[in-house]
Amino acid sequence: LRNARTPMTKAKTLNMHVPSHAEFVLEGVVPPNVRRVEGPFGDHFGHYSEEAEFPIFQVKAITRRRNPIYPATVVGKPPQEDKFIGDATQEVLKPLSKLVHPELTDLWAYFEAGFHNLLVVSAETRYEREPLKTALGLLGTGQLALTKVIVLVDPDVNVRSFTRVVQAIRRNFDVQRDVQIIARAPVDTLDFTGGATTPTGGGKLIIDATGRGPSSDTAVPLPGDLSAIAPGVMRSRFIEQTLLVVQVENEPRRALEALVASPLLSRVKMIAVVSPDIDIDDDTSLLWGIFTRFDPAQDLIFTNAELRGPVPAYSGVMGIDASLKSSYPRPLEMDPDVIRKVDRRWGEYFS
C-alpha cells in the first residue's frame, strides 16, 4: 500500500523487532498453561459475557511514538462503533473469499446479529447441492468458522437486505430438503447460547434458499388471535408471508410448541418466539433478539421430526426458540448516570 517496507526497530526487552512508527508497542510474554478468570464484560453480542479462564499477558514494557493516538472503539448492543469496522472488514476481505470460493457472488454478515450469528451468501449453483458445499467450505474458512447461521441465496438476491433474503426463503425454502443442523461445532467464545467455552461447543444452521424451479408466492392466512393457540402471546409480526415473529410473555418454549403444531399455521415456513424486551417492529432489535438468543442444536423444533436410519428428517413448520433463557447473561444496559454525563459533555469531546 505504501510502496515501501515497514520500518522496524529493536524491541526494548525482547529479542525481536517491532514497527518503528507504531502508536504503541506492548512487550511481554504469555506464560504457557497460565489462566485467569476474565469477565463478565459487555461485548458486541449485546449481552454481558460469562466469566471464563483465559491466557494472560505479562507486560514488560510499553513504548510509543511521539504524540501517539490511542485507537479505541465502543462495543455493545448493536448498533455501536464496531458496526462500521465490521462492515469495512467485510468489504476488504470479500475478494479474498472469492479466491478460495469462486462460486461466490456476494456475502454479508449482519451487524444487527453480532456479525458471527448471521451470514447471508449468494452464489452460483453449477451442480446439484453445490450451495451446501459452499456453506460447508465457508464454515471451514478462518473466522467464518464461527458463523452460527448461514443462509444461501441466488446471485440476483441482495444479501444485505433481510427483506429480500426472507423473500428468497419464501420462494425456495423447503424444510424437508433445505435444512442442515450441525451440533457440537466451534462457536465464538462470546456465544452464550451453545456452550462456547465448554468441550461440547454449539450448533450451526444452514438454510438453502437457492432456486430450483417454479415456486409459489400465494398469500398465507393467519388466524386473528394467536393467543387462542398459545396463551402468553403479546404481539406478532409476519415478515414477507414467511417468518412469523411472536412476542411471548411467559413459557416461550411451550408457546412455540403449540404454534408449530397448530393446523392453522401449517402454511407458515418459520415461527420465532422472542422475549418482551425485543421491539419486533424495529428491524435491528428484531434481528438482534432472534439471532443472538438461540442455539440451532438446542432451540429449533419442527412440526414433525424423526430419524431415518442415522439421518434426521424434518417436515412442517420450523420453530425457533429465541427467548431469553434463564441461563443467559443479561442484556447490556448503560448506566443512566453515564448517559447523562456523556450527553452533557458532547460539546467538549473531540474539540
Image (cartoon, rainbow, N blue to C red):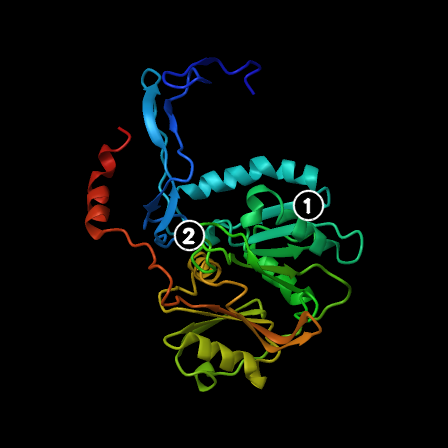
In the rendered structure, which amino acid carries the disc numbered 2?
A: Phe
Identify the element where label 1 is drawn. Answer: strand
Percent of width and height locating residue 278:
39, 64
In the displayed orientation, state which residue is furthest to the front. Answer: 33
- Report whether residue 217 is seen: no
Above or below, 144 against 225 in this view is above
Residue at 47%, 62% (x, y): give it.
290
In front of the other: 299 or 46: 299
Please rate how many residues cluster around mark 1, counting C-alpha atoms within 10 Å: few if below 14, some from 14 to 19, many from 20.
Answer: some
**141 above or below 241?**
above
Q: Which mark is residue 105?
A: 1
Residue 275 in sight: yes
Q: Quadrant of the C terminus?
A: top left
Q: Is residue 6 above or below residue 290?
A: above
* CA separation in Å, label 2 and label 1: 27 Å
Dot 2 or dot 1: first in sequence order is 2
Q: What percent of the width, then of the height, locates residue 161?
A: 56, 53
Name the one closer to the observer, 350 or 91: 91
Instruction: Identify the residue position indicated by label 2 in the image.
Output: 45
Circle nearer the viewer, 2 or 1: 2
Helix, strand or loop under label 2: loop
